[in-house]
Amino acid sequence: MKNSTVIYPGSFDPITYGHLDIIKRAAAMFDKLIVVVMTNSKKSCSFTPEERREMILKSVKDLPNVEVDFYDGLLAEYAKIKNASAIIKGLRAMSDFEYEFQMALTNKKLNPEVETLFLTTSTQYMYLSSSMVKQIVSMNGDISDFVPKEIHEDIVERLGGQG
Ligand code: ADP
């Protein structure tokens, strides 16, 4: 896509190497990628939207065409505001599919100008989720293979040994 801005939404509670892999691959394909922390989720989060944004910023500091933002409204609206041509989603397993398919069709209905594009997870991250990271760290497990080193301490300080 030429002159393209795309958005990558999620809760990123916290960002993992699985997310970062999707970010790097999408940033290589499009002119600008906006990672957007969605704060309207029903999920109860461990980190505030500002903390999640800060952790993403630290993790993407070497990627010049990546911006980080948060939004508490509808994703389809956000895409309009930013004039985004696509929403990027990562797909880990069949279990992600049904929900993501429903979301993609809903967003298309709300904003017909925006496409949803799915990137397949890299195999080494297919089991990786934010909730898995939180579970491991709460039991004092080693998360260094799962989250960017720039945010490792932030997560251990906040959640370490709470299991
Ligand atoms: P989680 O399900 O881990 O709480 P988010 O809501 O933050 O994740 O997810 C944001 C996006 O990143 C979604 O499209 C999700 O499918 C994708 N994603 C999350 N973890 C991975 C991974 N390990 N590999 C590929 N995509 C992922």
Image (cartoon, helix red, strand yellow):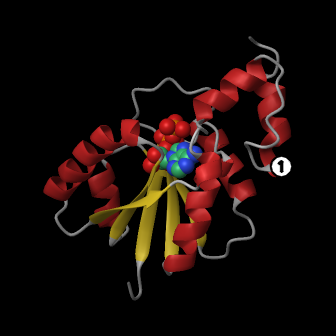
Position in image of residue 61 (x %, y %): 74, 65
Q: How many marks?
A: 1
Classify residue 159 by image quadrant: top right
Does any portion of residue 75 appear in the rendered image?
Answer: yes
Quick check: 51 left or right of 39? right
Q: Residue at x 76, y 13 (%)?
A: 162
Q: Quadrant of the N terminus?
A: bottom left
Position in image of residue 38 (x %, y %): 45, 44
Position in image of residue 116 (x %, y %): 31, 61
Q: Residue at x 68, y 71 (%)?
A: 63
Classify residue 25 by image quadrant: bottom right
Q: Residues within 10 Å of mark 1 (few under 14, many from 20)?
A: some
Q: Secondary structure at mark 1?
A: helix
What amino acid type should be assigned to the residue bearing mark 1? Lys
Q: Quadrant of the C terminus?
A: top right
Classify residue 115 by image quadrant: bottom left
Residue hosting label 1:
149
